[in-house]
Amino acid sequence: MDRLILVEKLESLRRCVRRVELRRADTVETLQGDADRQDILSLNLTRAVQLCVDAAGIVIADSDEPAPQTMGQAFDTLARMGVIDAALARQMKRAVGFRNIAVHDYQVVDWSIVFEITHRGLDDFRAFAKAMDALLQSSQA
């Protein structure tokens, strides 16, 4: 496993989460009326998802598991490997769904969902980073 690249991905993930924390809106209405904030949040959330997918790929590539066919399958594979639990895999797959909407069909983004993610969904990214940190620590031993 390329530890240095994984560490860099996790650091970038933490920066994205922090940026979302700093720029999230206090109300859905504020978010709906602020295109600049929407851009900042969408960009950092989609980056965070992609960084998690990339990190999953690094871990899976170093295993005997077959390469996942979709981004969501990467998290199922990590759960099967015991790196993350099934509940976190489900949440990360939902994050991939958001990413796909934000990247491919920006006009239909539901800003109330983005608001919820920025206030209640960031712990999923933190839990993912924590699981990856634990994997890094255990592979050092």
Image (cartoon, rainbow, N blue to C red):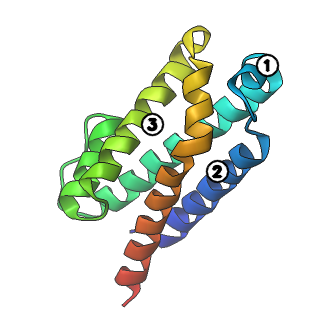
SS at mark 1?
helix
The image's mark for residue 64 is: none
Q: Residue furthest top?
A: 107
The structure residue drawn at horizontal position 40% and vertical position 86%, both measured from the top left corner, is 140
User: Disc 2, disc 3: CB below 8 Å?
Assistant: no
SS at mark 3?
helix
* Foreground residue among 127 and 79: 127
Tally the marks: 3
Q: Residue furthest bottom?
A: 141
Relative horizontal placement of residue 92, taking residue 66 as reference (left or right): right
Percent across and percent down for residue 40 are 74, 33
**Type of the residue with mark 3:** Ala
Percent across and percent down for residue 123 are 52, 53
- What residue does disc 1 label? 35
User: Disc 3, disc 1: CB below 8 Å?
Assistant: no
The quarter of the picture where residue 120 lies is top right
How far apart are the alpha carbons under marks 2 and 1?
A: 19 Å
Is residue 113 among what the camera can see? yes
Callout 3 environment at 10 Å: few (<14), some (14 to 19), or many (20+)? many
Pick whichever of labels 2 and 1 is earlier in the sequence.
Answer: 2
**Type of the residue with mark 1:** Ala
Relative horizontal placement of residue 45, taking residue 93 as reference (left or right): right
**Type of the residue with mark 2:** Val
Is residue 46 among what the camera can see? no
The image's mark for residue 95 is: 3
Percent across and percent down for residue 11 are 62, 62
- What residue does disc 2 label? 17
